[in-house]
Image (spheres, rainbow, N blue to C red):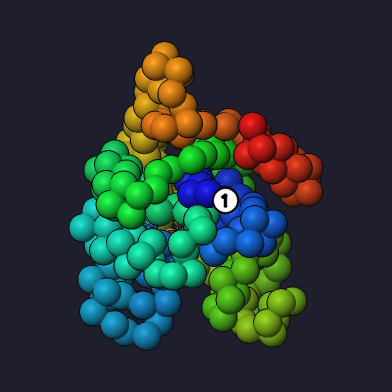
Amino acid sequence: MNIVLLGPPGAGKGTQGERIARTLGIPKLATGDVLRGALAQGTPLGLAAKAAMERGDLVPDSVILGIMKEALAAPSAAKGVVLDGVVRTVPQAEGLARVLSELGRRVDAVLLFEVGDDELVRRLSARTTCEGCQTPYTGRDPGTACEKCGGKLVRRKDDEPEAIRSRMRAYHEQTEPVIEWYERRARKSDDAGARDHNGPRVVRVNALGNIDDITKIVMKGLEG
Ligand code: AMP
């Protein structure tokens, strides 16, 4: 099953994506994690993405399509993949459809995590992230240790107020149109009575509330 997670930064895509991937026994791909890893290692990919990431802007579609192609062709992703923050523009959605179709696959489900802007700003401003395994925490001071791997918690540069504003703007202007793009494809397949062959199922999830409750709702949504 190939699942696209859509939603603004701070909506909980990473946390829920981890759980979905574990439950379904498929890997999770988060382009943000790939790019941060590349940046930490100082690779050309990381250097190409650095400035845009630190400003809170999107990196170019061509960079993301390269990461997508490589990750989806990996044997570990053959049974499916959870795509967390991988599709953030319409050209990326089109590119993903193309890459998957070359592999004889398609997007099966799109999960849209919905949370209001005020709550997102509150969450991101209070967030620290493990510099080792990338686990996010709310309300823990930078410098304390990650519960999972013992790594150091840091404040991401793009969780500073100005970058948060840019990321929200990028979401509204560039990523929201992707929701409509997928919904149109889902409607088209419904009309044709051919959902099994074409458009994905789009499931809207209210992402405010208890993490375990949201996981239950998400898993139910995936069962259809
Ligand atoms: P995230 O960890 O998902 O919040 O991503 C962190 C940053 O990485 C974003 O603010 C972008 O600068 C960049 N990024 C990650 N995924 C994408 C994508 N699909 N398209 C463009 N930029 C991305």
In the rendered image, which quarter is residue 49 located in? bottom left
Q: Which residue is mark 1?
A: 13
In the rendered image, the vertical position of residue 135 relative to residue 217, given as above or below = below
Question: Residue at the location (23% across, 79% down)?
Answer: 44
**Residue nearer the viewer, 36 or 109:** 109
Q: Position of residue 11 (x, y in %)?
A: 58, 46
**Residue nearer the viewer, 96 or 90:** 96
Q: Position of residue 56 (x, y in %)?
A: 37, 56
Q: Is residue 183 visible?
A: no
**Residue nearer the viewer, 147 or 223:** 223
Q: Callout 1 environment at 10 Å: few (<14), some (14 to 19), or many (20+)? A: many
Question: Residue at the location (33% across, 36% down)?
Answer: 173
Q: Amino acid at mark 1?
A: Lys
Relative to 150, is 110 on the left or the right?
Answer: left
In the rendered image, the vertical position of residue 159 relative to residue 34, given as above or below = above
Label total for image: 1
Asked if the beta carbon under badge 1 is closer than 8 A to the nearest atom of ligand 1, the reply is: yes
Q: Residue furthest top?
A: 191
Q: Is residue 175 visible?
A: yes
In the rendered image, which quarter is residue 129 located in? bottom right
Q: Position of residue 200 (x, y in %)?
A: 46, 34
Q: Quadrant of ligand 1?
A: bottom left
Q: Which quarter shows the C terminus?
A: top right
Q: Position of residue 126 (x, y in %)?
A: 63, 58
Question: Residue at the location (37% across, 85% down)?
Answer: 41
Q: Secondary structure at mark 1?
A: helix
**Residue nearer the viewer, 146 or 144:** 146
